[in-house]
Image (tube, grey):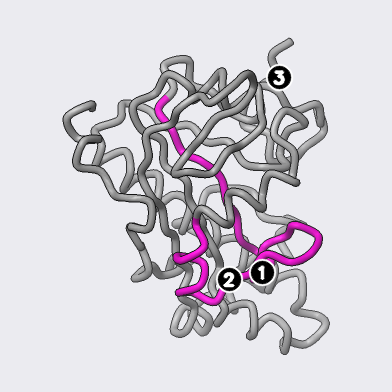
Amino acid sequence: MEAQVAGAAGKDDFTFLDDLRLPDSLAFFDRPLPYDSAFLREKVSYLLPEVREFARPWGAYSTHRPSLPGADRISIGGKVFSSSLLVRELGTLEAVFPFLASEGGELSRWAASVEEDLKKAAFAVRFIALKEAEEALERHISERWSLPDISAVAPGALEEWPRTEQKALFDLMGPAAGRKGMILNSKMWLEPLVSSSGIYFHSPTGFHNCYLCRDDDCQWRRFARRE
């Protein structure tokens, strides 16, 4: 890993995955959907072939070696984040991978114009697009950097790394966001709305946000909470 990091991308260099497509059908998507039901899935299945023609989900990441400038502070790509969680999980690693993933502007604009009875199905399609982008990033990083497992942490998902930290992460990934027309609004939400950001990293302990999340009723929970 260390030899690879020596030739890693610089602060303003990004790897883009922007030739992504939605699956042909729900048979290729095995996650639960927002507002999931048999009726919703019928509508999503109706929409997918049409939307797949113009939807362009994308992901981008950069590669950095973190440093520790002070207690509970970590520097990544010249941006300093305040988080004991990041220090604990990332502070000793040779490389971390800040990322952006998005449904893409094409899908966001389409969803704004669909009829009311298709709004929930349209949101589910957008969710599928985002997950396709995130999973493509995970595969690419894992294969390129020969990581046996990959974990992620996102600002705002846990109290230990609050949403206010989104600004520094967005500044770090700014050139990539600008290329795709992504913005960060005043409430620290990304636009297009169905987008995500965070940091991928190799974790020998297999860290996941779910381990620390206090929302035991979350429908997206993939791992039990650790006390």
For the residues marked 2 and 3, what is the alpha-carbon distance in whole angstroms? Answer: 33 Å
Q: Secondary structure at mark 2?
A: loop
Q: Secondary structure at mark 1?
A: strand
Q: Is residue 16 magenta?
A: no
Indicate the quadrant where residue 218 lies: top right
Q: Amino acid at mark 2?
A: Met
Across and down, in percent, residue 207 comes to 54, 23
Q: Is residue 200 magenta?
A: yes
Against 62, is 5 above or below?
A: above
Mark 1 / mark 2, whichever is N-terminal: 2
Q: Amino acid at mark 3?
A: Arg
Indicate the quadrant where residue 225 lies: top right
For the residues marked 1 and 2, what is the alpha-carbon distance in whole angstroms? Answer: 6 Å
Say if mark 2 contacts mark 3, CB within 8 Å: no
In the picture, measured across the screen, residue 199 lies left or right of residue 111, that is left
Residue under the image location 31 percent in, 26 percent down: 148
Mark 1 / mark 3, whichever is N-terminal: 1
Report crowding for label 1: few under 14, some 14 to 19, many 20 or more residues within 10 A (C-alpha).
some
Viewer-proximal residue among 111 and 84: 84
| Residue on which disc 1 sits | 191
Viewer-proximal residue among 178 and 189: 178
Q: Amino acid at mark 1?
A: Glu
Viewer-proximal residue among 215 and 122: 215
Across and down, in percent, residue 41 comes to 65, 64
Query: Which residues make up the magenta segment?
Result: 173-202
For the residues marked 1 and 3, what is the alpha-carbon distance in whole angstroms? Answer: 30 Å
Mark number, residue 225 = 3
Across and down, in percent, residue 77 comes to 44, 44
Residue under the image location 66 percent in, 28 percent down: 83
